[in-house]
Image: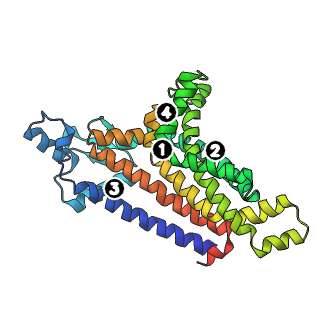
Amino acid sequence: MGTYIVRRVIAMLLMLVALSIVTFLLFQALPADPAALTCGKSCSPQVIAQNRIRLGYDKPLHVQYAKFVEGIFVGRDYGSGTATFHCDAPCLGYSFSRSSDVTDLIKDRLPVTFAEAIGACVLWLLLGTGIGVLAALKRGRWPDRLSMGLALVGYSFPTFFIGLVLLFFVVFKFKIMDYPSYTPFADDPAAWLRSMILPWITLAVIYAAFYARLTRNQMLETLGEDYIRTARAKGLSERTVIGKHGLRAGLTPIVTAAGLDLATLLGGVIITEQVFGLPGLGALSLSSVLQSDLPLITGTVLVAATFIIFANLVVDLLYAVIDPRVRLA
């Protein structure tokens, strides 16, 4: 098990190095001049030249990358002389359009997206796996057909449509709650919870539909195995057969999908955050693109991709716990 973990961690570190190189080179290859984007349309050539030196864009590409990596681990300085300012580690760059470190901007928005993603993930896993198991046990009967029909309908609608429908009926039509403007948890936990309920439900509807179908298919395949029939022949209760033997054996693809879906949401739920006005990482990413803020775009892309790579590591380790045969791979 220890060797397996070491191999996976080394692979993750190599992926992170490759990710940083690709992300850095990708945005350096853009035709836009990063220095010209720091001071608007009225910027003079002299100011652009000064900003280019101040940000280090006048250096060779490999020197710029070395400074970028240095900033992540130990921080870095921008400018020279009296105009020097320091960016603390982990420094992902400096946004002149917002006059702030990219890392600070991401840290301010990340808790919103984190709470949104975790809450939705818990909901869709509970609903999706529960409905999927029920449909598998009632195969061919009305609970199976009804649940799979609803899952197909839920999976067919786009996120923004579900969000807008929830807003219309819950907020405007029946006035069950006020418009869910975001409130930080530290300011008012109850108001924070109200602002997160509808985004959680919106994401859970989409993902629970997919997980219900996935769980049903896995359970039907697993319940037909010989060891399930053996467990029942031994007189084990149906709850033990389903929970301990059937569901656990079918968890592998569910764990894979859940890990990657959660990582994707942590990278930024752009549509949902726009519908409900949540100041999360997705909204920050969208605004950075609209403002052509290259340092901020680079930072958000790097963070989002890091979540996905780390999620792959977690999924690999969970595989080894669920199925010991994976450790030999």
Q: Quadrant of residue 194?
A: top right
Question: Closer to the observer: label 2 or label 3?
Answer: 2
First-in-chain label (3 vs 4): 3
Q: Position of residue 252 (x, y in %)?
A: 63, 65
First-in-chain label (4 vs 2): 2
Q: Position of residue 30 (x, y in %)?
A: 21, 54
First-in-chain label (1 vs 2): 2
Task: Report, in whole angstroms, how far the alpha carbon at label 3 lies from the one at label 1.
Answer: 42 Å
- The circle on residue 158 is 1
Q: Is residue 140 left or right of residue 78?
A: right
Task: Decide: few, some or many residues near mark 1? Use Cα within 10 Å; few <14, some 14-19, many ≥20.
Answer: few
Q: Position of residue 233 (x, y in %)?
A: 89, 71
First-in-chain label (2 vs 3): 3
Task: Report, in whole angstroms, how far the alpha carbon at label 3 lies from the one at label 4.
Answer: 44 Å
Tell me, yes or no, whether the two marked residues, 2 and 3, touch with CB atoms within 8 Å: no
First-in-chain label (1 vs 4): 1
Q: Position of residue 258 (x, y in %)?
A: 58, 55
Tell me, yes or no, whether the two marked residues, 3 and 1, touch with CB atoms within 8 Å: no
Question: Closer to the observer: label 4 or label 2?
Answer: 4
Q: Is residue 236 above or below residue 182?
A: below
Q: Amino acid at mark 2?
A: Leu
Q: What residue did someone put label 4 on?
A: 164
Task: Report, in whole angstroms, how far the alpha carbon at label 1 lies from the one at label 4.
Answer: 10 Å
SS of the residue under disc 3:
helix
For the point 9% across and 37% down, the residue is: 44
Q: Amino acid at mark 4?
A: Leu
Q: What residue did someone put label 2 on?
A: 123
Task: Report, in whole angstroms, how far the alpha carbon at label 1 lies from the one at label 2.
Answer: 18 Å
Q: Nearer the viewer, residue 104 or 218?
A: 218
Can you say which quadrant of the picture contains the C terminus? bottom right
